[in-house]
Amino acid sequence: MTKPRSYFTSSMKSKIAIAAVEGKLTQAQISSEYGVHATQIKAWKQTALKAIEDIFSGAYEKDKKAQKQLVEDLYQEIGRIQAQLSWLKKKYECQPGRKTCYD
């Protein structure tokens, strides 16, 4: 019979990662204490260290600014396309020979 899959909350993952980063306990001790495989602990530790590095390097802020600029550009493009579409609809409705023409 297999053991049901364990799901860990983000707070539990961060607690385990902090314990691994602190280095007070070995991976085997952390693994037995929290019931998590050593490979998973190593992965969470690496993720935490990478996130900390990104925060202090300013990469997070750069990504945030780039994302904001991308969203603004996409909204401008959407507005431009909607204007073109409404113009084409109006032009199509007002062609000579058609009975309906809206202002």
Image (cartoon, rainbow, N blue to C red):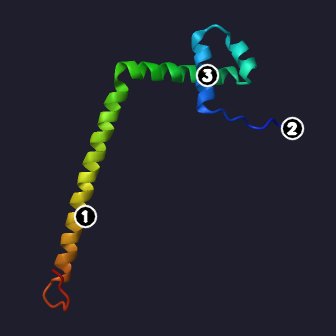
| Residue 93 higher or lower than 69, as above or below | below
Q: Residue furthest top?
A: 24
Q: Residue at x 30, y 36 (%)?
A: 66
- Give the image quarter of residue 20: top right
Q: Residue at x 23, y 68 (%)?
A: 85
Name which residue type carries label 1.
Gln
In the image, is 68 to the left or to the right of 8?
left
Disc 1 + disc 2, Cβ < 8 Å: no
Residue ID for mark 3: 15
| 10 Å crowding of disc 1: few (<14), some (14-19), many (20+) | few
Residue ID for mark 1: 82
Mark 1 vs mark 2, foreground winner is 1
Q: Earlier in the sequence, mark 3 or mark 2?
A: 2
Name which residue type carries label 2.
Met
| Residue 34 higher or lower than 21, as above or below | below
Residue ID for mark 2: 1
SS category of the residue bearing label 1: helix
- Give the image quarter of residue 27: top right
